[in-house]
Amino acid sequence: MQNSKYRIRLLIVLALCFSFTRVWSAAELPAQLTDEVFWQLVTEFSEPSGRFPSDNFVSNELATQRVLSELTKARKAGGAYVGVGPEQNFTYIVALQPKIAFIVDVRRQNMIQHLMYKALIELSSDRADFLSRLFSRPRPSNVDKNSGIGALFDALSPIQADQQMFDENLRAIKDRLIKEHGFKLTSEDETTLGYIFRAFYVGGPDLGYSNVAFQPRSAGPRLLPTYEELMIDTDENGQQRSFIATEENFLTLQQFEKDNLIVPLVGNFAGSTALRSVGSYLREHNTLISAFYTSNVEQYLFMTSEDWKNFYTNVSTLPLDSNSTFIRPLINTGNGYTASPQFRPTFHWDTVLFPIADLVAAFNAGMIENYYDVIQTRN
């Protein structure tokens, strides 16, 4: 009798353990997202597109990498990454190795640009192939997988763009996204995709932040960096660490894209849907925010009396711990940091890390009234 009771108790314990294991496993983030789930997140988490005065084809911040050593020091891979804007996010994702990444930008054009990148990265065999496709230029014959990033651009820059390659590449991008992945792009989305891809075709490695940068560098000095300059830049220790600096970096990013783990959303930081949906999803999957790259969005949010409050309220709903970090590019005038997003020739960028929890605590305590209060929350 006692043996029977023992067996029953043992079976109950084992059943409970199995049940708890299944519940926990169901809550864990998947190693990859199906195309259907990926597109569901994109569509359900997104908000209506907002307006912004620039195309933002590439980052305008020539300091993206100069915080990577500090950012990754004693930080384990994992967690979730949240960012905004175009390609600079890839460099942070490769460095941080999160479990999933969400790119939240008020412009639907940015979401379409990330889908363009997704298709190109998935289709490319290596970095040289990627750059050849991105700029619609024949692949240089004198480079290989071991070539440095500077050598890749040196070899590619003299090569003229090819209209036939552009047409073929654009068709391949659409086929990858629509036919293979099954993403339901609208006709307007397809038009936007063509507009973005043509910018890279016309601008090539000299493409800059906005469409005014369609002019090649030889046309005169430019205030903001080119695509090439951003890619060959270095971290604070002089090491090139962009997402195409090495073949290893590119392959890491490619796997993220193939696994559907970089999810681009249309959303206002101060909106009621995108960031809150991301937070709910991460909580459901027991995942904390590792890093949140804000660009200079906060400077724009402080132009109204409510947007910045709504943003920090949204941030307070995210799953955080003491290691959750804001990545903030600050505009240094030479006499300190400015609250204005306007960049001038004598200014430079500093990328600075801030504990998110400290900001949330200060906001909840009523200690945040302006942008300068925000940048005082660094340890």
Image (cartoon, rainbow, N blue to C red):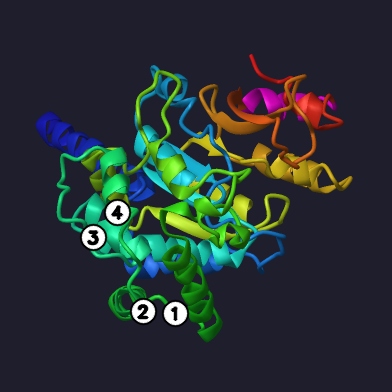
> Which of the two labelled residues, at mark 3 and mark 1, occupies the earlier sequence position?
3
Q: Amino acid at mark 1?
A: Lys
Neighbour class for label 2 at 10 Å: few (<14), some, many (≥20)?
Answer: some
Neighbour class for label 3 at 10 Å: few (<14), some, many (≥20)?
Answer: some
Give the image quarter of residue 297. Answer: top right
| Disc 4 target residue | 156
Q: Position of residue 349 (x, y in %)?
A: 62, 31
Question: In this view, which residue lies farthest toward the bottom?
Answer: 187
| Disc 3 target residue | 124
> Separation of disc 3 and disc 1 at Cα?
23 Å
Q: Is residue 259 visible?
A: no
Residue 357 is inside the magenta segment: yes
Residue 178: mark in rendering = 2
Residue 184: mark in rendering = 1
> Which of the two labelled residues, at mark 3 and mark 4, occupies the earlier sequence position?
3
Q: Amino acid at mark 4?
A: Leu
Residue placed at 34% from the left, 80% from the top?
167
Residue 348 is inside the magenta segment: no
Q: Position of residue 191 (x, y in %)?
A: 52, 80
Residue placed at 83% from the left, 24% from the top?
367
Q: Is residue 152 above or below residue 214?
A: above
> Separation of disc 3 and disc 4 at Cα?
16 Å
Tell me the mark number nearer the camera, choosing from 3 and 1.
3
Q: Amino acid at mark 2?
A: Ile
C-beta proximity under 8 Å, tags 1 and 4: no
Instruction: Look at the image and give the residue range highlighted in magenta.
Output: 356-366
Is label 3 in a helix, a strand or a loop?
loop
Q: Quadrant of the C terminus?
A: top right
Q: Is residue 254 above or below residue 293?
A: below
